[in-house]
Image: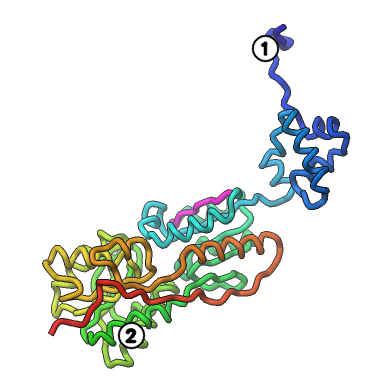
Amino acid sequence: MRLVGWRGEPATRRHPTLDDVAAAAGVSRATVSNAYNRPDQLSAALRGEILRVARRLGYPGPHPVARSLAARRSGALAFLLDASVSTAFCDPALSITLDALATAVAPDALLLVPGGAAAPAQLREAHVDCAVAYSLPDRAPVLRAVRERGLPLVVLDGPARRGATLVRTDDRAGAAAAARHVVELGHRDVTVLGTPLSAGNLGGPVDLRQALASRYRVDRERYAGYREVLAGAGIEPAVWVAAGISRPAAARTAAALLTTGARPTAVLCLSDELAAGVLDAARRLGLRVPDQLTVVGFDDTPTAGSADPALSTVRQDLTAKGRLASGLAAELRAGRHPHQPAPLPVTLVVRDSSAAPPR
């Protein structure tokens, strides 16, 4: 027999509801709701029986939107970026950190909010209950939108904000270890290669004081670590910034760096992608690394191990950083106020791209 509606169309089968499950299981509607939303309120046996009845009836569980409205929380995180998604993902350190965070928060939703003029408006409309900021500049407008909404905030790398929980690596100590490594090898002609200081920067030499006043907390800390050790050794490094954060952009800037004026014997880079760009430029110029040029990176992403030669670099645990941020976000969303975590440790990893300077 075919069921039809009052106009003759086939009648759609009614989906089972929470009330249907309650009636079939012989419990109250609230008890069925607790089986899904507050399982700690029921015995394991009772919850198991309710879920078996729900499966038999074909009840899929509470609708996620209705559940979030009832709980007055979405279960979603906003992940705030400084640049467009395509530009940001040129940085493998971001990809590794985000992957660890996203895996840890599953099955909650993760909303990527790229940098730009539209970011504050996008965040104001987003159905999220917590924000995680990744290495934003000090006065990023989207941070004001976070404050206006009263969202709990976890900051990865920076900037430090009152009321926010900061997850960071000991960047200054890592940079100091890298600088100490090249000094102990005997290098005196050292250049530091960093990321752009401002939007639209075409790359080139900058004053060290400009670099130390960068809008980014991580960059300031790493420049300070380099300076501390190099100054102690009587070395005043040249400082260049790349035209972008990607390897090709770094290679273009490094080609100019290595052919303008006196060539350095060592280049300290604020990331492995920048260091890989220096390797590419050196290869095109016929310079042998490390015989004629030492190159040291920072982060120890897969780029460092696969480079030719393999990069000496500073290792930070990017996976631990992402997981820590996820755990802190969960604490904040639950209304708890976790302690400010200590900086994550770093380790100098010496590979094939560093050696004593040529005589």
Q: Image point 25% across, 72% down: which residue?
A: 353
- Measured as percent of width and height from the top left, residue 71 is found at 73, 49
Q: Position of residue 248 (x, y in %)?
A: 25, 59
Does the magenta segment cover residue 113? yes
Q: Is residue 149 left or right of residue 95?
A: right
Name the residue nearer the viewer: 205 or 105: 105
What span is in magenta? 109-116
Q: Which quadrant of the rendered structure holds the N terminus?
A: top right
State left or right for residue 110 relative to residue 15: left
Q: Residue 297: horizontal and vertical position, in percent? A: 32, 71
Q: At numbered mark 2, what does the secondary structure look like: helix, strand or loop?
A: helix
Would residue 314 be counted in the magenta stretch?
no
Residue 103 against residue 8 in the figure, above or below: below
Display coloring: rainbow
Distance from the alpha carbon under mark 2 to that under mark 1: 78 Å
- Residue at 11%, 67% (x, y): give it: 286
Precedes in sequence: disc 2 or disc 1: 1
Per the image, the residue denoted by label 1 is 10
Q: Is residue 45 above or below residue 325?
A: above
Identify the residue shown where x is 79% and y is 47%.
44
Q: Residue at x 69, y 34 (%)?
A: 60
Q: Residue at label 2? A: 180
* Residues tagged 2 and 1 counted as in contact (Cβ below 8 A): no
- The quadrant of the rendering that contains the C terminus is bottom left
- Give whichever of 332, 7 is nearer the camera: 332
The spot of residue 10 in percent (x, y) is: 67, 12
Between 250 and 301, the one nearer to me in the picture = 301
Decide if residue 267 is on the left or right side of residue 169. left
Dot 1 amino acid type: Pro
- Figure check: 323 above or below 185: above
Is residue 270 in view from this perspective? no
Residue 200 numbered tag: none
